[in-house]
Amino acid sequence: MSRILLLIIMISTYAFASSGAEGGGTDIVQRTVNFLLFFGLVWYLVAEPAKNFFAARSQGIADELQKVQDKLSDSVSLKKEALAKISDAEKFAEELVTASKRENKIINDNIMLQCEADLETITKQSTTLMQFEQRKMVRNVVEDVLSEVLSQSSDSFDKEAMANVILKKVA
């Protein structure tokens, strides 16, 4: 209702302001009153929506800024967490390298000990085998020589007893 009344007053001031040049006087007072009424009317109609618009716009910008700052703080905290995880991973990698070097040394030492033990066993076995083969060869040679000697000698010797005595001495 007040807007309609204000609109009627504004239209009436316009009607009064247009009749100023007939009397030969100036119409500065009417024009000033018209301007003040027009400005008041515009202020009344536009001021609250303009204030609300700019207040809402300011609040929207502030909200967006707050969201950006929240995201920034979240990003900073995530970055710190990621850096802490990277630091932990680097420490774990260093520990893993150290542990694997220790285990490698232990395994290498065990393998070397096992190789040395196997080498000693093989050496002993080959020595024993060689001695056995040498004895076998000597025995075969002695048996061959003995059988030759005994076959050429007379029957007065006890061939078997003589062979046993020689073989016992060789062995």
Image (cartoon, rainbow, N blue to C red):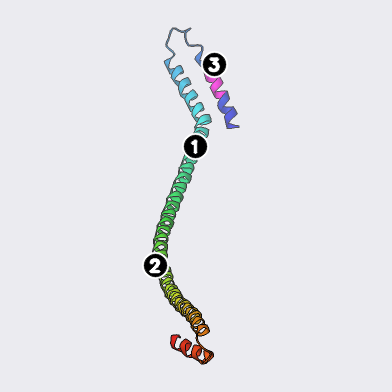
Q: Residue placed at 47% from the left, 90% from the top?
A: 165
Q: Secondary structure at mark 3?
A: helix
Q: Nearer the viewer, residue 26 or 108?
A: 108
Task: State how far apart marks 3 and 2 are (Cα).
Answer: 109 Å
Q: Quick one: label 3 or label 1, which is nearer the N terminus?
A: 3
Q: 116 and 162: which one is in front?
A: 162
**Foreground: disc 3 or disc 1:** 1
Q: CA distance from mark 3 to mark 1?
A: 39 Å
Disc 3 designates what residue? 15
Residue type at tag 2: Lys
When the figure is inspected, residue 24 is found, relative to residue 150, above or below; the finding is: above
Magenta extent: 8-13
Name the element at disc 1.
Answer: helix
**Residue 167 image point, x, y percent:** 48, 87
Q: Quadrant of the N terminus?
A: top right
Magenta stretch holds residue 138: no
**Percent of width and height locating residue 79:** 43, 51
Q: Secondary structure at mark 2?
A: helix
Disc 2 to disc 1, how far (Cα)? Answer: 71 Å
47 relative position to 106: left or right: right
Residue receiving disc 1: 57
Q: Position of residue 109 (x, y in %)?
A: 40, 70
Name the magenta segment's main secondary structure: helix
Query: On the image, numbered disc 2 is attached to which residue?
Result: 105
Amino acid type assigned to the residue bearing label 3 in the image: Ala
Asked if residue 9 lies in the magenta stretch, the reply is yes
For residue 150, above or below residue 31: below
Q: Earlier in the sequence, mark 2 or mark 1?
A: 1
Q: Amino acid at mark 1?
A: Arg
Classify residue 120 by image quadrant: bottom left
Q: How many marks?
A: 3
Q: Residues within 10 Å of mark 3 (few under 14, many from 20)?
A: few
